[in-house]
Image: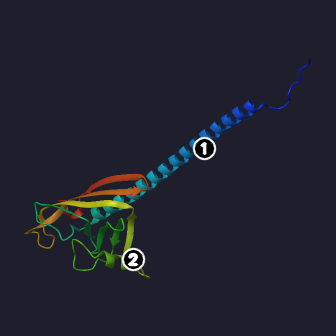
Amino acid sequence: MIRQRHRGALLADVLVSVGLTAMLMTSAGVAMKSACHGIEVNDGQLVTTRASRRMSSALARTLRCASVCDIGTGAAAGTTKVGTVLYATTPDGTLSAYVYDPVADQLLLDTHPAAPIADTPDLNNLHSRMQGDNPTVSVMASNVTSLVFRGRYDNRPDPANPATNIATLVNVQISMEITQGEQVQRMCESVVPRRSVQ
């Protein structure tokens, strides 16, 4: 008796090949998803690093050229003050305010701060002045989840009357945290305002 050979695959062969193909497709999908997640994490890290460096260097440049600098309404000599508002007056007399808005997670730059200078400015007023043809408030950085200005005050000669001493901000430490997705970037910058250098 002659056996006839079957042409084609048996059911067991088909099931094994389908199972192997499914495993290969699943592993390729997992590898692709991991690669895409890695790209997103890297992009988030790059965005937060750039934003924090840009903000940190802009603040440091401003403070280094500031003729007068105060955290909020200032403090007495020999004390340390912590706040979320930093005022800087450039040598030409231009007053600017760096204000942290914890509700919107933004650092705002106010180029024409309203008087009187305060430890806690009106955030609604700041946001309303961001609109229009000639905005005086701009967003320096977004996704800022925390920001603190910490400054040490000491006695220095008054520029207007060198015979008397006044409380002067001699060192400012800027601590900030920027969050982009899962990425968190923490930065700390310490600067000496120009006026306090003797």
**Dots 1 and 2: beta carbons under 8 Å?**
no
Q: CA distance from mark 1 to mark 2?
A: 46 Å
Residue 74 drawn at (x, y percent):
17, 68
Residue found at x 39% / y 56%: 179
Question: Where residue 197 sits: x, y (%)?
Answer: 20, 59
Q: Position of residue 112 (x, y in %)?
A: 31, 77
Quickly name the residue at label 2. 130
The single residue placed furthest to the right in the displayed view is 1
Q: Quadrant of residue 8?
A: top right
- Amino acid type, mark 1: Gly
Nearer the observer: mark 1 or 2; the answer is 1
Residue 189, horizontal then vertical, whole percent: 29, 55
User: In the rendered image, which residue does mark 1 sit on?
Assistant: 29
Depth check: 36 or 64 in front? 36
Amino acid of disc 2: Met
Q: Residue at x 57, y 41 (%)?
A: 31
Look at the image and tell me whether residue 60 can be seen.
Answer: no
Quadrant placement of the N terminus = top right
Residue 140 higher or lower than 7, as above or below: below
Quarter the C terminus occupies: bottom left
Q: Does residue 186 appear to the left or right of 182 in the view shown?
A: left
Q: Residues within 10 Å of mark 1 (few under 14, many from 20)?
A: few
Secondary element type, mark 1: helix
Asked which quadrant contains residue 153, the reply is bottom left
